[in-house]
Amino acid sequence: MAQRSRTRIDPKTFLKDDREAIERMLPPALAPIASAVLASRAMLDLPDDWDGEGSPGYREGTWLRAVEFAVGNALGFWEEYGVAVPAPKLRKGPVGSVDLHWRGTDRELLVNIPSEETAAADYYGDDLAGGHVAKGTLDPTEDNFWLLMWLTKM
């Protein structure tokens, strides 16, 4: 059985103000994810000690890894299963890391992309009903469709 070729994204596309290039890269069902990513780009403008408490600024490489994780997995999941995942919020994480946060009515998922380029990402998922919590580490450079399956209850 031949393996399907998966579309790969160039996360650097999100550094540009070229919404048309981004729209061509993604199916319309994933437009909310593109919007969330573009809205988060402002964190790259924060200098060291942006909070007055010594926090480092956010490096472009860390943000790009978070973009690649969020958009790449959403696009691959769409191509493989035909399911559009909701858009995460990309937020300032601790010590220069980037948090990806999905919160629905019955599931919540947080993935922390660390500032260290080769470090594993932490994840925490909660079914918000007191019945199931999932947490651990993962390789953010791999396809992590299983996490999106859990999020979408697929």
Image (spheres, helix red, strand yellow):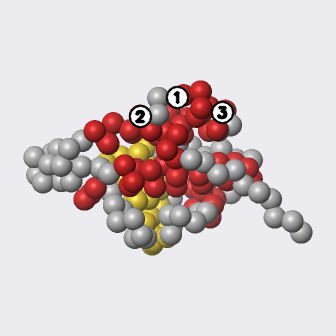
Q: Position of residue 134 (x, y in %)?
A: 49, 68
Quarter holding the N terminus is: bottom right
Front of the two marks 2 and 1: 1
CB-based contact (under 8 Å), mark 2 and mark 1: no
Question: Of callouts 3 and 1, which one flags the residue occurring earlier in the amino acid sequence?
Answer: 1
Which residue, given by chain and number where applicable, does mark 3 sit on?
A: 24
**Residue 73 on image: x %, y %:** 60, 54
User: Going 33% across and 36% down the picture, which residue do you hit?
Assistant: 42
> Quadrant location of residue 143?
bottom right
Q: Which residue is mark 2?
A: 39
Is residue 55 shown left or right of residue 32? Answer: left
- Give the number of the disc on residue 83: none
Q: Which mark is residue 18?
A: 1
Q: Is residue 51 visible?
A: yes
Q: Secondary structure at mark 2?
A: helix
Report, in whole angstroms, how far the alpha carbon at label 2 lies from the one at label 3. Answer: 18 Å
Which residue ends up furthest to the left in the rendered image?
A: 52
Kindly identify the amino acid type of the residue bearing the numbered disc 1: Asp
Query: Which residue is pictured at 43% across the width and 66% down the height?
Result: 121
> Depth-wise, is mark 2 or mark 3 nearer the camera?
3
Sooner in the amino-acid sequence: mark 2 or mark 3:
3
